[in-house]
Amino acid sequence: MTFEDLNLNTPLYNALNDLGFTTPTPIQEQAFNVVSSGKDVVGIAQTGTGKTFAYMLPILKNLKHSTQENPRVLVLVPTRELVVQVVEEIEKLSKYINNRVLGVYGGTNINTQKRAVAEGLDIIVATPGRLYDLALSRVLQLKSIQKLVIDEVDVMLDLGFRHQLINIFDILPERRQNIMFSATMTEDVDALINDFFKRPERVSIAVSGTPLENISQTRYNIPNFYTKVNVLTHLLKDREIYNKVLVFVAYKRMADRLFDKLDEIFHDELCVIHSNKTQNYRLRSIEQFRNGDNRILIATDVMARGLDIDNVSHVINFDTPIYPENYMHRIGRTGRAEREGKSIVFSTEKEQDSIEHIEALMRMEIPLLELPETIEISKELIEEERPQIKERNNPTKRHTEDEPGAAFHEKKDKNQKQNLGGSYKFKMAKKYKKPKTKGDKNYNKRNKRK
């Protein structure tokens, strides 16, 4: 099948020709008619399979020109980087279409975004938090939304956006088309579909967890952080083979720690990205890596899903991800657009359980390689790897978990609460001689005379 078989309009064909695209991906081919029908849609497809075009092609084909100020299409994505990327993709397809697209996200001046919204738009791409802030300010009116797209919904729920999504659903028109795209189907995703979608039609491409066939996977068993650094340094010194490398780590502190170690050797070739970095820093790191100015990018899982970076030669999992789905999304950064890719995963003894879960999900074993003989096995451990010392016979420590802490004290007798029930008001009236009613001001006087 080619794009000609999808019965698009001339402006979209011209845009696709400019981009050099002639053949739709499987998710684009199967989702087109379903999205065009106006039914609620749930699309499941791996990262890098063209999900953005899969929902935008039918939407743009049927989006008629309008001069109204309020948006008609809402696309929700989990991260700022994805907002930027999706807006770029929509603008590529809209090259010959007269529509207005705006991306909004947190971490930037909301007043600037309010002014942009007030100028009128057709499609808004947003992170949930900033969209809700704009809607509450009454500058952004969502009453005209006809189509809601939630992209990378599994990531959104992992990041704790469920409450914000429900708030957004409450202020959207009840009659709308819901379109959801995800790389994995989880219990949380399924619950969201059951609560808010109306008899959705499912479009699924490949079983969740099936590795892309053009990605070669290998792994090393490595005892600790510093030995991992030695192995990684050994590999990265081969600049010809490892020419564009994404290195994934478990958390932000690890990203900074690894960056400091590699910076001593690969200073001008290295950049890092995680959620504690400023927006400009993150975007600059992505652009430098995408353009080839930096050969190595260290990243947390904020980069693992949705971002489209071409020609990544290797994905190296410096830390084995706890969730096997995250492993799939990480390695999906390489081997894109039918190119060959390579993935390597480092695992300590504690991470072996995670390796087993990953292999069970993929229904295959990752080949284990022997460490090169030249690698120095370090004995030094980082804080997280050191065994915790338990003082079993310390007489100064409490042994009973139920004993109160140091700040605990019994209340004084006069402050102890008593459940006085219905008799409380009568006891107070007797104690303070209060009148029976507001009008009976002489009640106390009469009682004194008695």
Image (cartoon, helix red, strand yellow):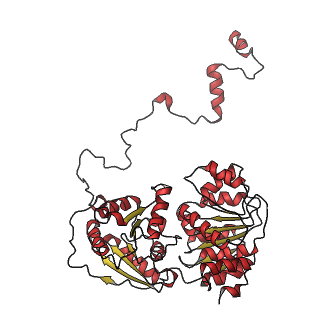
- Of all residues, the one furthest to the bottom in this rendering is 1
Residue 153 % position (x, y): 59, 68
The answer to which quarter of the image holds residue 223 is: bottom left
Q: Which residue is drawn at 23% across and 46% down?
A: 395
Name the one closer to the observer, 198 or 334. Answer: 334
Identify whether 427 is placed above or below 251: above
- Of all residues, the one furthest to the top in this rendering is 449
The answer to which quarter of the image holds residue 6 is: bottom right
Q: Quadrant of the N terminus?
A: bottom right
Residue 377 % position (x, y): 21, 71
All told, the count of numbered labels is 0
**Whether residue 188 is visible:** no
Identify whether 190 is placed above or below 388: below
Name the one closer to the observer, 102 or 387. Answer: 102
Identify whether 41 is placed above or below 216: above
**Whether residue 227 is visible:** yes
Residue 118 % position (x, y): 72, 53
Left or right: where does residue 221 sit relative to residue 184? left
Residue 145 % position (x, y): 74, 63
Left or right: where does residue 29 sit relative to residue 237? right
Q: Residue at x 74, y 55 (%)?
A: 141
Q: Quadrant of the C terminus?
A: top right
